[in-house]
Amino acid sequence: MKCDEPMRHLGAVEIAPFVAALAAQPESLWDADGQFQKQLAPYRKSRTIYLLMTVGGPLAPTRELAGWAPLQQAFAPIAARIAEFYPRPGRVLNAQIALLGPGLDIPEHIDYGPTLEATHRVHVPLETHPEVQFIVEDQNIALQVGEAYELDNMRRHRVFNPSPFRRIHIIVDYYEEPVPAIVAASVYR
């Protein structure tokens, strides 16, 4: 979904319980949905734990993936906090945890597809480093741990991690339910 600026700061998110829950998971969880990642993003160098995924638009079914059962309880307050940033009620269509190791990059791209075009793409850094470069339309944007940011994923963006540390973000695609036509007609007159 498009926003007015390439990256918009939304506000603070309490991440400590989620970070603790993530640290308690086996290393194998990062690779549990490897086949799915190969289909979705075959050339990505990041490792991903998928929680929820909706393919085909907001009305398509949402699948619970390997990370959902062990992380659902810790994720619920983060999802609720993200919902508070938007005026209309909605729901999470996609949720994942992406790890980009030292020296790795995510090449420049634009996200596309009916689900991604209909949602707000929200990043919440769990671990990062000042050297990490998150570049949206040639603008390097420094993201802070525990803060939520909405990325206009319809713009060119890429990430490079030249630091010796890993970078981990929760990435959430939040869908605001549309205003019913009858309500919109009376409210917007």
Image (cartoon, helix red, strand yellow):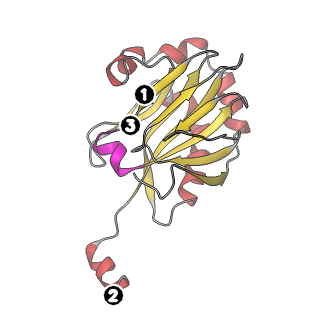
Residue 71 in the magenta stretch? The answer is no
Name the amino acid type tagged 2.
Arg
Question: Is disc 1 surrounded by few (<14), some (14 to 19) or many (20+) residues within 10 Å?
Answer: some
Query: Closest to the observer: 95 or 7?
Result: 7
* Residue denoted by label 2: 189
**Residue 88 at what x, y percent from top left?**
45, 65
Instruction: State the predominant SS element of the stretch in magenta.
Output: helix
**Residue 152 at what x, y percent from top left?**
46, 48
* Residue denoted by label 1: 65
**Residue 155 at what x, y percent from top left?**
42, 43
- Alpha carbon separation for disc pair 2 and 3: 36 Å
Asked where in the image residue 34 lies, by quadrant, the reply is top left
26 up-or-down from 186: above or below:
above
Q: Judge from the rendering whether residue 68 lies leftward or rightward of residue 177; answer left or right.
A: right
Q: Please name which of the two marks, 3 or 1, marks the residue nearer to the observer.
A: 3
- Alpha carbon separation for disc pair 3 and 1: 24 Å
Name the amino acid type tagged 3.
Ile
Q: Residue at x 57, y 44 (%)?
A: 76
The numbered disc on residue 110 is 3
Q: Residue at x 66, y 54 (%)?
A: 11
Q: Secondary structure at mark 2?
A: loop
Question: Where are the magenta residues, as a range?
Answer: 112-119
Q: Please name which of the two marks, 2 or 1, marks the residue nearer to the observer.
A: 2
